[in-house]
Amino acid sequence: MNRILALIKMDLSITFGLSAIRHKIRNRNDMIQMIILGIALLSLIPAYLMMVSGLSRIYYAYLNIGQKSMFLLTGILACQVIILFLGILYVMSKYYFSNDLNILVPLPLKPKEIIGAKFISLLIYEYITTLPLLLPFIIIYGVNENANILYWIYSIIILVFLPVIPLSISSIIVMLFMKYTNIRGKKDLLRTIGYIALIIVMIAFQLKMQNLAQRAIDNEDFLYKIITDSTILVRSLGIVFPPSMWAALSLSNLTSISGFLYILLFVIASIAVFYIMLFLSDRVFFQGLIGNLEVSTSGRKARVKSSDFQRQSPSCIAIAMKEVRVLLRTPVYLMNSIGGVVLMPVLMVISFFIEGEESLSMIKMLLETNQRIVNLIGVGFIVVLGFLNSVCCTTFSREGKNMWIQRVLPVSTKDQIIGRILSSMFVQVIGIMVLYGSMAYIRVLTLEGALIIAVLGLLGSIPVGELGMIIDAYRPLLNWDNPQKAMKQNLNVIICMGIGGLYVFGAGFLIYKLMDTVDLLVIYGIAAAIFIVSSLILYKPLEKIIEMRFNSLE
Amino acid sequence: MLPLIYINNERGGMMLKLQNLSKTYGKGSVKAVDNVSLEIRPGEIFGFLGPNGAGKTTTIKMIVGLLKPDSGKIYLDNIDVWENPMEAKSRISFVPDTPEVYDKLKGIEYLNFIADIYGIPKDIRQERIEKYLDIFELRNAVGDIIGSYSHGMKQKLVLISALIHDPKLFILDEPMVGLDPKSSFHLKEIMRERCNEGKIVFFSTHVLEVAEKLCDRIAIINKGKIVALGTMDELRRYSEEKESLENIFLELTANE
């Protein structure tokens, strides 16, 4: 037990950077950054208050149809489903790709001790992130109901056990996934494809369940039941994730014995799933992990051949090729860049697919009459992918300890910029292809549309790419030993999404305003002009910042 | 304060010149390099010696463009390295003490990348790369990704990549650390060969024997200051009874 406590303590200190924060407070520059971060967080408060007041309106809506327990289900379900999905990401990086594994694995620890400690540390992280979401639901319901002490006790129990089942399920899925994809040679590729497939399957499953629940409600005598049974909605929709339903029902049936039974069920199920996960971890964790960091060699095939020597390419192409190769061969980069641009259009189609043929034909009808607007939406979609793909806003951070190579080589800043933009374009082209496929599936793709989306989409990706590079050149995150940190845990990505989002919103708003007065062909021209002009405007500052940073880094 | 030993070398035009170079870390509290001036001529193997933290790597980083000097100038063939970095960098190559290279690239891809950046045509790059792959016995590994290489193999790869464009100034930071005896023998031969062609080799080291046998001239740096400069003979003449470089080194870098 002591060993697990020690592990948990160390893990928490690393995860939340406790020692690092203490160190940072002493440093003036870091202090300023933390203050800015604090202000940014404070600025979220009004939005949060608005959300809370919106929630209380939802409560009254449910109250009016006599289904107030549905309000609790909404909150609990939302939290648990979010934990389940994000859990897959967290668990994967925490169990299999974190740095402490090199230290922990050789120590005389059982897999379930390592996993147990990592699980608890994730659990604490989940408490911190889900509390602001769930607490308003609990409080609004409790206050309006004049809830007694038992309600608050049950609530605390629910809060404590809430992340256990979803996080355990994510852990089980990830551990099995890692075990069966731990195949020598093609591991990275297999895992990336499998990972994307996994997310698609899970989302499809989720949507299908929702669809089933919806069907149950559409039933004719359902309206009658709603009047007679105050938990019918919860029990129909709760099928999506039964533990959430148990938690909600325990709170809404406080006074009866069934309330107690539901909370008992919730707690026992949580503990049981957790133990199943631990039991499994002892058997499969190391099988997925060992050899994870090993790199295979190809033996004699690696011998150099005459064809290996390429003809000379310009510097910018060499940079772009190098960027693309590293991007394709590093799973974390691949998932976050290409994974994103593939996933988004596919998800769009899946949601139509699940909704069934009727909604598909409805959307088709709606879109067919507005083909050119469809094209503009497509362009906007690609431009959004331009910053969501995170290629440019982490391009220098990804260099990490190899940054010295870029700095000692005689590469002009212009070549650096062009090469890195080109690597983002490579990802964008894949996104465009997948978008074409998705659009063809819902039958709204035309030749004209394809052309417009490709040309304007790529043109629009340049300024957002430049924007990302400005941010990343200004504050590159070079000191990492795990590529996760360069892309997934890089604040630059979020900053870029914020500023990029504003840019797209601004340009989109302008075009939307013009739509009524100007011919659409002219609008295409205006969009192109906006993209070109903003690319040119951003180029100079970008060049300056790169030159400055390449000189001043230490 | 120990006397500096200046020498007069009459071997043609100047190539590398450091002028009053200074660099401080941590808001001026630590002077890593303190007013260093050096002139290194074509055809010289120049050894840069000093204890840990003396300022060797800092000086080298300033020459190759990784660390901006607080004051002072660096000229290579009369080109100011920090004013015209592109021109200077195309004449320099640098081998750092820790070979950090792109783990996800294949060895040959990295070499092609470097050759592209220096604009080396296919036939020349093939000839040079194959020559050095044979010397460093890396021919059978170069199709694998660099992540599978050992420390020494990575170091050899960086060495090869640094030789592809036949640089006028070859700078190495602790080059012998991590190399097997055979490779370090070959490296010394390559260094000698380059000097015979009138190019400069500038390297830092802890290994005094290497410096003693290999270098035309040696500078000893301590606490950011050059405390001795000259040929091996001149250094010996300065302190006759001390004989070995080790004794000279120990005396010069002793704490006052």
Image (tube, rainbow, N blue to C red):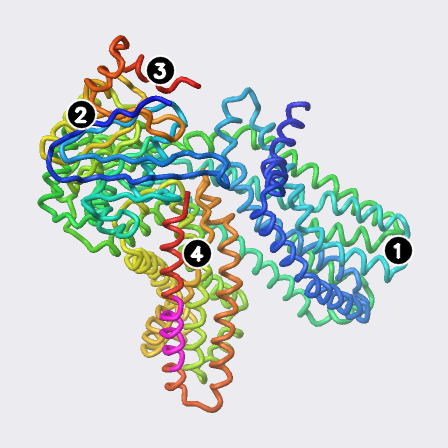
- The residue marked by circle 2 belongs to what chain? B
Local SS, label 2: loop
On the image, numbered disc 3 is attached to which residue?
B250
> Distance between the Cα atoms at labels 2 and 3?
20 Å
Whether residue A533 is in magenta: the answer is: yes
Amino acid at pointer 2 = Asp
Q: Is residue B234 visible?
A: yes
Task: Give the residue at mark 1.
Answer: A147
Q: Position of residue A100 (x, y in %)?
A: 52, 31
Foreground mark, 4 or 3, reads 3
Q: CA distance from mark 2 to mark 4?
A: 48 Å
The stretch in magenta equals: A526-538
Q: CA distance from mark 2 to mark 1?
A: 89 Å
Q: Position of residue B110 (x, y in %)?
A: 25, 42
Question: Closer to us: mark 1 or mark 4?
Answer: 4
Is A514 magenta? The answer is no
